[in-house]
Image: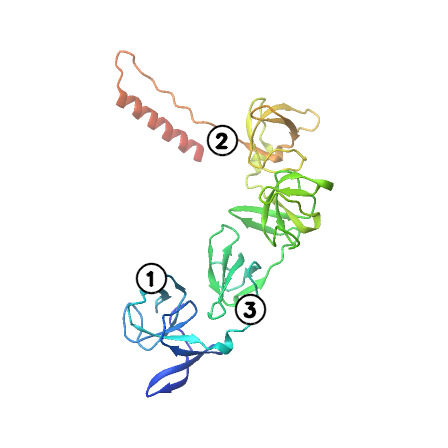
Amino acid sequence: MAALENVKVIDAKDGVITKIEVDGKQYERVDQSPREGYLIMAIEDFLDTTKGRFYEVINTDSFGFAYEDDLNDYHTITYYEKMFIVFALVSKNKSEVPKFKVGDLVRVIQKYHASNGEIIRITKINCCARYPYRGIRLKNGSLSDIFKKEHLEPYTPKVGDKLTIDGVEYTLESRKARVGEKIITILDEGKHGLYNVYTVKRLGCLGMPITKEKNCSLDHHEYMVLVPVKQNEDSENHEYKIGDLAVVTSNTSNHEFEIGEKVRIIHRSDVTGNYRVEHLDGSDHWYVSPSELEPAPQPISVTVTVNINDINIDQIAQQIAEGLRKGLAKERD
């Protein structure tokens, strides 16, 4: 957001601007520190900032405020630096009802924006700002850019949609959840809120999932199941040997392993091709399909050759380091 365009002067006194209009909203000159959403007019040229032009305050803290200059570079100015005249949104416009509310999921539809097409959760609305909406990017949990309402559209999860949440891609399914699976709420009828993600800890009455995070149940119509999309099809065709370690990646067999848990292969059915796997402590076991597993990372082994008559500690350390380097490189490949 560089200098604002189409700024219309509404009122001026003795050559000093006192009221302006931008995008249909009026701002008046105030004698106070700027806040997020306020406009500022430069009173001198500096740092690619032009005297007489207007800029929007995009962030504030206890030390100062931030804006973007004519080249879209981010600058932070302390409150003690008197290089701007401050303009605040006039009060009659502050009651404007926002199109979205905090907690809503929206899709970015701003063409050419880096986040175009992404899903974000609204976390903050500043009615005073020209770009009032800010949120969290669903795909990685990072803070989103700020947007106008015309840059966003409502998003409602639907069966078959693909969502990337915290770096993992999921497909949405409408069915009863199983232990260890992740679910997303689609109704706000209890303690779980709307469009929040939870892990199923166990099943309660009538098979209703009880979440790990809230330790209370959800009715089946209140959620959809998040099913991880396979990133590596080779893992489905991997043949395990008895004693091999694997990682549980999904739950389509009604087992009671945690997603992401490391397990041990103890038997393979010649009829179904499914594997009987157990907890590493051997406390319990279930049958799972190959598509629910992926090979566990193998430990790196290093062989060091030492002449007992010529022990050199530095040489041994160097051999170990070189072995680890090669092992990690092989694992990455």
Q: Judge whether residue 141 can be spotted in this image.
A: yes
For the C terminus, the quadrant is: top left
Residue 267 at x, y = what percent? 63, 23
Which badge, 2 or 3, comes first in the chain's sequence? Answer: 3
Q: Residue furthest bottom?
A: 14
**Looking at numbered disc 1 in the image, what kind of residue is underneath it?**
Phe
Which badge, 3 or 1, comes first in the chain's sequence? Answer: 1
Q: Secondary structure at mark 2?
A: loop
Say whether marks 2 and 3 touch (CB < 8 Å). Answer: no
Residue 164 at x, y = what percent? 55, 49
Q: Residue at x 63, y 26 (%)?
A: 284
Depth order, front residue of 183/152:
183
> 82 left or right of 262?
left
Residue that mark 2 sits on: 297
Residue that mark 1 sits on: 63
Residue 16 at x, y = what percent? 33, 84
- Disc on res. 98: 3
Using the numbered discs, state the Cα–Cα distance from disc 2 to disc 3 in whole angstroms: 49 Å
**Looking at numbered disc 3 in the image, what kind of residue is underneath it?**
Pro
Depth order, front residue of 41/47:
41
**Looking at numbered disc 2 in the image, what kind of residue is underneath it?**
Pro
Using the numbered discs, state the Cα–Cα distance from disc 2 to disc 1 in whole angstroms: 48 Å
Q: Judge whether residue 275 can be spotted in this image.
A: no
For the N terminus, the quadrant is: bottom left
